[in-house]
Amino acid sequence: MRTLTRILLVQLLWSVPIFAQEGNTSFSLDEAVAYALEHNYDAINAGRDLVDAQKQKWETIATGLPQISGAVSYQNQLKQPVTQIPAEFFGGEPGTFQEVVFGQPQQMNATATLTQQIFDGSYIVGVQATQAFLRYSRNFKEKTDLDVKTAVVEAYGNVLLTKENVLILEKNKKTLEDNLFETKKIFENGLGDQESVDQLQITLSSIDNQLKNAKRLEKITLQMLNLMLGLPLDNATELTEDLDNLTQRQIDFGLLDSQFMIEENTDYKIVQNLNEQRALELKLAKSRALPTLNAYVNYGGLSFGDSFSFFDGGQDWFGFSTLGVDLRIPIFSSLGRSANTQRAKIAYDKAKTQLTQAQSQIKLQHESAKSEYVLAIEQYQTSKDNLNLAERIEGQNQVKYAEGLASSFELRQAQTQLYTTQQEYLQSMVDVINRKTALENIINQ
């Protein structure tokens, strides 16, 4: 069944939300969607990714702002090196040497350094890339919200479908039980045949199995909806919508005439983000041929001693300071930079082609979604008419059978046709709801 397949697919695609609330909860469809956008696991993480992108943007910007670092080093020469100096320097015999130890065994060095990036082409491109990534994160959050909406609408519709299906099957079972009871009585009185009893028994057994399965699915679909909403699986969630009324509200032919702005489509925005990323990668490759310029200034102090007395009040410290500029110029890379730039240009050209392709695909998806929406509405209206006809045919066969003008086989055919039409009618209502959601996602409403 298509309905069960959708349920299983939704279960595989969505993980358990981390925010769960206890208690009875009632939702209309719009309320369920709004609730899920705050509590669904993927929606929550997409929001976190957006915050992460904002932090990443500032992290990149900060690398080009002044940086201050400090360093402290301590050294204790447990065995100081000995240096030989000609003894004649000290009044000794020429040709002889005197062993001398220079300096004190312990020293401490404390330094503070200020660095400032003056020019770096990759930094400029990096800042632009973080801004592009932030736009991508916003679009991805929007895409995730649309996916959550789709999943909730399908889960909500499946719950309504299974509830209606249970009611219909219970009604069908009751009718069959009455028919079987009357047929048995007729057969026991010698006015009927065994085949009529057997035909009705076969139909009743089939409907009974379908009813049991429908009740199991009723529980599963409700648990699936709770899963989408971030509620405990066994939460007593109540739905305030009626399937037929909800379907009627989802029929909006004005949606078909609304102007389609492809720039508002989320998938198109994401493809644009990819195009922008490839353009920045090309700029980055070109920037590697530019020089980089950085400046720094530091100030520090050195202190020496025979023992660790550097924090004593009378300890001498000898200051020093340095101002410097670092200029690096790329000269020759054996054509490595050129090859890297050419590869980036190829990737950018491919991205532009993908953008053109995406435009055509999205426009085609829009036309297809409109067609499927119209078809779903037409099938709903046809299924509704067919259901009235099937009910009339089944009712007429009930009368004919009771009067002995129709066989049990003919009655079973009419009943089977009615049951099939009932399922088609229920499915057509869910299709209208889902097809409208799909169209709304494409035009980003």
Image (cartoon, grey):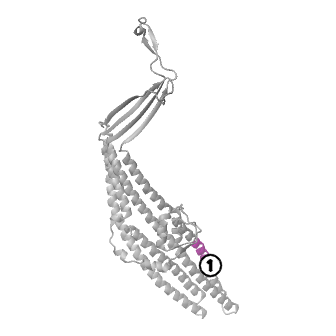
Quadrant the C terminus occupies: bottom left
Callout 1: helix, strand or loop? helix
Image location (x, y in percent) of residue 190:
69, 92
Residue positioned 62% across, 75% down in the render: 212
The front one of 131 and 337 is 131
Can residue 419 be seen?
Answer: yes
Question: Seen from this angle, which residue lies furthest right?
Answer: 188
Can residue 347 be seen?
Answer: no
Amino acid at circle 1:
Asp
Question: Compared with residue 102, is residue 329 higher up or lower down, i.e. above or below?
Answer: below
In the image, 427: left or right of 256? right
Q: Is residue 111 magenta?
A: no
Snapshot quadrant of residue 168: bottom right
Image location (x, y in percent) of residue 85:
42, 12
Image location (x, y in percent) of residue 374:
40, 76
Neighbour class for label 1 at 10 Å: few (<14), some, many (≥20)?
some
State whether the magenta stretch is mostly helix, strand or loop. Answer: helix
Question: Compared with residue 163, is residue 150 higher up or lower down, i.e. above or below?
Answer: above
- In this figure, what is the number of numbered marks? 1
Write down the region rendered in magenta: 204-219
Q: Where is mark 1, residue-wise?
A: 208
Image location (x, y in percent) of residue 385:
46, 85
Residue positioned 43% across, 53% down in the render: 52
